[in-house]
Image (cartoon, rainbow, N blue to C red):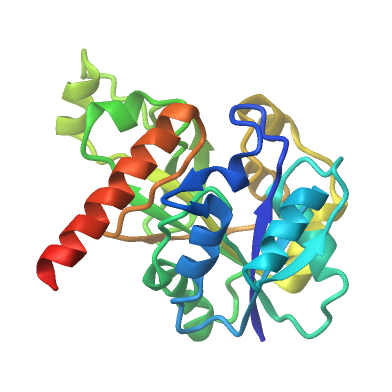
Amino acid sequence: MIIGIIPARFASTRLMGKPLADIDGKPMIQHTYESAKKSKLLDDIIIAVDDQKLYDVVKSFGARVKMTPKEIETGSDRIAYVVDSLPGADLIVNIQGDEPFIKGKMIDQAIEPFLFDKEIEVSTLAKKIDNVDDLKSTSIPKVVFDYNNFALYFSRTPIPFVRDASTLFDRLLLTDFYKHIGLYVYKRDILLKFSATRPTDLEKAEKLEQLRFLENGVNIKVVVTELESFSVDTQTDLENARKFYHEKIKKRKKND
């Protein structure tokens, strides 16, 4: 069974109450849930919350919901807490609660490698960076991977370093950069082992939980997608998300 779990933390340091932020009359977490339901490979979806108000809102729009301890710090650890009571879940998909417009096809792209290669333990998504703003943004993690598409490193700074480039624009011209899209698929046992280990040095330095896998010798398959995601981390991101949604609705009505 393939279970999608959406971790939703109310007490976000950058945007308090972020999962309940309104986007055109719906809380952001509902947009994420409805987007995830468009996946063709997920068997079920559960939203993992840490707050009673958030729990009640999720129940109100008909999603499965699980209360988790507030002190859990990472999304993967929150998901592991839920998975511990789901013995029938073979593959677990971590769908970020702050990705209101995640496409079902992107979820399926991340799942597909497991259908053809039984050795894969964890997968994630990446998209080629085509502008300087994304390249320099520390809220957009970058990833480098080998010729077999296994991750070598993740960082909030532009990687790889291009020695012959004098500007960020020159770097884009000289090499390919990829932003990491925070959607993961894990085998159940790998996720539970991850949660049982302590945060690692690089993970704490970069504030990127996926580095815990690499530091403990777990390979992460990187699937390159052409599809775009939209992560909401700040108030500015939220305003942009609202504009994006309104433009999307206008375009849909025009095509109808």
147 shown above or below 11: below
Q: Where does the N terminus fall, quadrant-wise?
A: bottom right
Q: Where does the C terminus fall, quadrant-wise?
A: bottom left
Q: Residue 132 appears at what percent x and percent y?
A: 24, 27
Q: Residue 216 appears at what percent x and percent y?
A: 73, 49
Q: How many marks?
A: 0
Kindly tell me whether residue 178 is visible in this rendering: no
Q: Is residue 152 left or right of residue 13?
A: left
Q: Residue at x 21, y 39 (%)?
A: 130
Q: Residue at x 75, y 59 (%)?
A: 56
Q: Is residue 193 left or right of residue 137?
A: right
Q: Residue at x 55, y 42 (%)?
A: 21
Q: Is residue 74 left or right of residue 229?
A: right
221 shown above or below 197: below
Q: Residue at x 66, y 28 (%)?
A: 13
Q: Is residue 185 left or right of residue 232?
A: right
Q: Residue 190 appears at what percent x and percent y?
A: 74, 65
* Residue closer to the observer: 107 or 247: 247
227 shown above or below 72: below
| The residue positioned farthest toward the left in the image shown | 255
